[in-house]
Image (cartoon, rainbow, N blue to C red):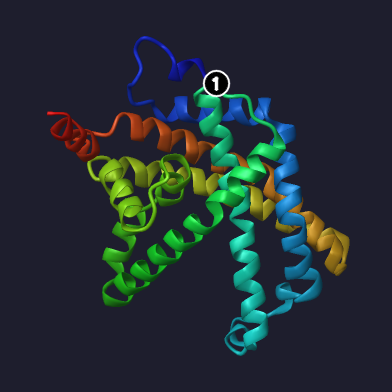
Amino acid sequence: MSQFESDHYPREFSFQEILLIAWNIYKKNYTLIFTLVFVVQLPVNIIIYGVLQLDSFTEASMINIDTDTWIILITISIFSLLQPIGIISLVKSITIREDIDFKLIIRRALNSLLPVAVTMFMMIIFLIILTMALIIPGIIFTIFWIFTLQVVVVTGLIGIPALRRSFYIVRKRWWRVFLYTLIISMIGMVVYLLGAAIKTLFGDSQLLLALIYTLIAVPMAYSTVAFAVMFINFNDTVIDDPDKDEAAIDGD
């Protein structure tokens, strides 16, 4: 992470630099990331594919899911946020050269879980409203708010301030962030499709299916690392930073 510490920083990284820095973090902390993915995703996937057998549901049957099942799905969806929260916390600690272990990651992830869940729920509601009104605004604001999760974990902002911070980071880089997000998402999709193809070789065992999807989540975690690196860099180099302007006014 020496790129974050050079005399020429802060500067905005190129996309290649973001991917390379993310790869170095992922590679050097693979064991920690692997453990985090398994601790969070394995029980989630066992419930989804083993207990609920969600893989066999059709789109029509999803509409008819009973209340208890929806409560379980919402609960495990919130629990699954521990994985990206933990990875983002890991990247943040690396950028400030802080020693971190698995217990510390989990403790910080648990502390951030409620603020993240509340803020992400708020964002989803807003995006649904925008998309129902007109599809284009929904797409536009999805990119404006793409860093909301990272904002909450790294800066501690919650709710509207977190959405506003993500907006200011992206607003003069919208097309760049859109392109970077598209490429990173495509990389993750390729990994997912390869894993989905592999699972067809192992029959219909639901527990084996849960294990395969957990294994797929390990390489896909690289995308979370890449987004965390991109956010930290873009947050450090945001143009016309309103927070810094307000701080300067308060200082006067």
| Amino acid type, residue under disc 1 in the picture | Arg
Q: Identify the residue at horizontal 47%, vertical 56% (top origin).
A: 115
Q: Residues within 10 Å of mark 1 (few under 14, many from 20)?
A: few
Q: How many marks?
A: 1
Picture coordinates of residue 77 (x, y %)?
61, 65
The answer to whether residue 150 is above or below residue 196 is: above
Q: Identify the residue at horizontal 64%, vertical 44% (top origin).
A: 107
Where the C terminus falls, by quadrant?
Answer: top left
The answer to whether residue 188 is above or below residue 73 is: above
Question: Could you say whether the residue bearing mark 1 is in a helix, strand or loop?
Answer: loop
Q: Is residue 188 visible?
A: no
Report which quarter residue 81 is drawn in.
bottom right
150 vs 216, left or right, is left
Q: Identify the residue at horizontal 52%, vertical 58% (top origin).
A: 114
Mark 1 highlights which residue?
A: 97
Report which quarter residue 222 is drawn in.
top right
Report which quarter residue 235 is drawn in.
top left
Q: Is residue 229 visible?
A: yes
- Tell which of 163 and 205 is nearer to you: 163
63 vs 173, left or right, is right
Picture coordinates of residue 136 (x, y %)?
28, 65
Picture coordinates of residue 39 (x, y %)?
75, 50
Picture coordinates of residue 167 (x, y %)?
28, 49
